[in-house]
Image (tube, rainbow, N blue to C red):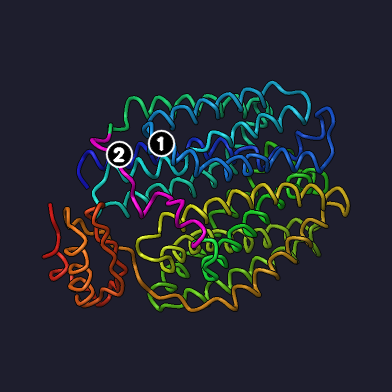
Amino acid sequence: MTSGERRAAVSLAMVFAVRMLGLFMILPTFALYATHLVGYTPMLAGLAIGIYGLSQSVLQIPMGMLSDRIGRKPVIIGGLLVFAVGSVVAAMADSVYGVIAGRALQGAGAIASTVMALAADLTREDQRMKVMAMIGMSIGMSFALALIVGPMLHGLFGVAGIFWFTAALALFGIALVVLRVPNPVVSRFHRDTNVDPGLFKKALTDRQLLRLDLGVLILHMIMTATFMSIPLILKQQMGLAAADHWRVYLPVLILSVVLILPMVIQAERKRIVKQILIGAVLGLGLACTGMYIWHQSLGVLVLMLVLFFSAFNLLEASLPSLVAKIAPAAHKGTAMGAFSSSQFLGAFLGGLSGGWLSQEYGLAGVFLGNALLAGVWLVFAFTMQEPGYLSSYLLRVGEVDAEQAEDLVSRLSAVKGVEEAVVIPADGVAYLKVDKRTLDQHALAAFSSP
């Protein structure tokens, strides 16, 4: 990457990370805090945790489309301002309804798709996957950090303090966008990152992509619902103060990452992604079942949490990769948009289901409900087709007319290792699916235009 691309990648990854950190930090603590709010019920507490996912899933694609019209930076800055206002509203609330309103506003600052589009504007096609990988890693790191920092801040300042800190993070994100993120020379539609409304229906009717959308929805339902129970169990049944919960999460997260790294590597190397996926879903279900049965034993609960987070992290890494493998070459952005919306919708539904199950069937009932959800997902995972082990590849070919585009498709398809080629005349880009093991890089480079 050039220095400008590295600067854009690091800055945008930090913008994404500070926002997601702000959203995630209340997960390990809010169930404890909510009991002191006016109007509290477990159902409303679950709604407060997950409501951001509803506004995020509804608004992120329209916000991305708005950025095509008025520019990326204005939308990102506006979204972060809305996020900051939502954080302040939640911090000042003394009722559960006020927190619900604040969290809904936090989600309404839906800048995920716009950040991706700006990253695409600022990077060349052959470097774009690196930038997207950096942003993806920042999301995972922010989630892990939130489970550690959230309980610490709760011990120092309470949950209201976490919301104030989140507002400060949003302002820091705005400063990054203004001072560190380069201005794009030109903003245009990128089929690998942007959503094409005309293709959205097709993405939602592809049975293989729908399995992945359902999978990520269930995954985030289970994750969000779990945090309606775990903090309360650690405090009420294990006698662990809220400020010390990080002492459980930190070793659990470290061990889970160590355990899944060999599986992530072997899944691609040995081309057993589907088998690893099925195993992870099964592990997730077993962990939920184990927590349902043995949630009163701290030792067993910690072991089940290691299994739970190992499965979660493995699935969180695998599912986007599968979407990229399965989606048509020129429709990746639209497929990822539908996938991302399903993920946020899952967080919303998980808050609702976790709150309702806790209210009706107790803390253990949440784990049983999650285990049943994992069982439903397992059925769909078994019936998924074996994915092609192909990678997305973008190649700038310059401006071409329709006849030249058709000829390019024919010639590119003849290159060894190219399995699918689409050339959109107006884009000046060839969207390819390639097998990296057999790809003739030298032959492909001959088609590249500066």
Residue 312 pos. (x, y %): 58, 60
Q: Which residue is mark 2?
A: 187
Q: Is residue 200 or residue 339 the one in the foreground? A: 200
Identify the element where label 2 is drawn. loop
Range covered by the magenta-colored residues: 184-202
Rendered residue at 62%/50% (across/down): 345
> In this picture, is 442 found above or below 35?
below
Q: Secondary structure at mark 1?
A: helix
Q: Are marks 2 and 1 in contact (CB under 8 Å)?
A: yes
Task: Please tell me which residue lies in front, 249 or 440.
Answer: 440
Residue, disc 1:
67
Q: Amino acid at mark 1?
A: Ser
How crowded is the residue under tag 1: few (<14 C-alpha within 10 Å), some, or many (20+)?
many
Tell me the kind of residue under disc 2.
Ser
* Image quadrant in which you'd find residue 83: top right
Alpha carbons under labels 2 and 1: distance apart: 9 Å
Q: Is residue 241 above or below residue 234?
A: above
Figure check: 161 above or below 204: above
Q: Using residue 378 as the reference point, say whether residue 388 is left or right of it.
A: left
Secondary structure predominantly adopted by residues drawn in magenta: loop
Q: Quadrant of residue 329?
A: bottom left
Percent of width and height locating residue 289: 75, 66
